[in-house]
Image (spheres, rainbow, N blue to C red):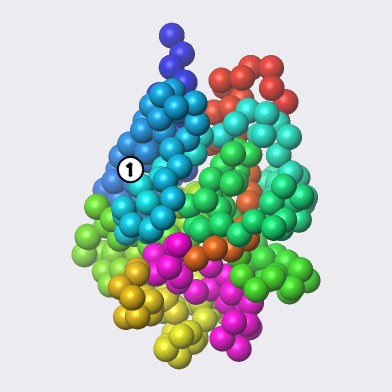
Amino acid sequence: MFRPMLFFTLMLAVTLVACRPDKLDADLKAAMEAKAAMEAKAAMEAKAAMGKSVEVSGKGGSDINDGGRLLSLPEPDACAQRPKQWERNGHWYFLSTNVSAYKDIKSDWLDARNLCRKHCMDAISIETVEENDMVLDILEKQKLPYIWTSGRLCNFKGCDREDLQPVLINGWFWSGSGVKLAKTNETPAGWGYQPWSATGHFKRAQPDNAEFEINETKESCLGVLNNVYKDGIKWHDIGCYHTKAVICEDSPPLLQYIAATNPNIKL
């Protein structure tokens, strides 16, 4: 008998499993899979009980100030009718500010991911220099001050291993794909330039967790800022409660889940 919840959990795990060296290794993948499975199970139970995903406003409740909210489940109709603004390497993308329903909406990091996930997408994971150049071009042409990505600091349970320390250098990953970022103090292999900014609020190279020194809020999420610190268009670690637009990209596991649970759907 087909079990949608089990399939959904397995599909979430697919984004975390690969043999390439740039992927997260087995122990960390296990921790992330357990976290994703727990969130998916809780979201499914909440949806059954309340008819929708859990929505709790306000700060507090976790290290990313998400108020205890969870990742949302994708919606079949929204996935079938997801905005397809441009395509690259088989993935469709959209910029939230160029969609009428979202043009005036700025979201915190979790809500930005959930906005994308509703459509079987996720916040963008910038895994190649070509994809980063695409993002830089979009921010420049659209005159956007900043956007969210799926970038996340691994500072939860299971991330305290020696090989991830210091965490600001070795502990970043793309939550949308499960790919581990290169060391933040080195130029990624094959890139030719450093995507992280050389400055910030305290005029230090990014990431630097600056806001923790101001109000004890961890800068656990990765945004792309457009010359905010007179530094060009660069990556910055940011407190996850800040609100921004987002670039969404197709999520194969979520598309596969909706396809498997809705046999006649056209995606």
Residue positioned most to the front: 58
Let me know if residue 107 is in the magenta part. Answer: no
Find residue 72 and report its horizontal and vertical position in percent: 49, 39
Horizontally, residue 216 falls left or right of residue 182, namely: left
Identify the residue shown where x is 44% and y is 27%.
50
Find residue 167 and report its horizontal and vertical position in percent: 31, 68
Horizontally, residue 140 falls left or right of residue 23, namely: right
Pointer 1 residue:
35
- Which image quadrant is residue 245 in? bottom right
Q: Amino acid at mark 1?
A: Lys
Identify the residue shown where x is 76% and y is 56%.
98
Horizontally, residue 264 falls left or right of residue 6, namely: right
Identify the residue shown where x is 35% and y is 68%.
218
* Quadrant of image for the N terminus: top left
Find residue 142 and report its horizontal and vertical position in percent: 76, 68
- Whether residue 124 is visible: yes
Residues drawn in magenta: 219-241
Q: Is residue 151 above or below residue 82?
A: below
10 or 214, nearer to the observer = 214
Q: Is residue 38 above or below residue 24?
A: above
* Quadrant of image for the C terminus: top right
Let me know if residue 228 is in the magenta part. Answer: yes
> In what element is the residue under mark 1?
helix
- Whether residue 17 is visible: no
Horizontally, residue 131 falls left or right of residue 117, namely: right
Find residue 122 and report its horizontal and vertical position in percent: 56, 47
Residue positioned most to the top: 1
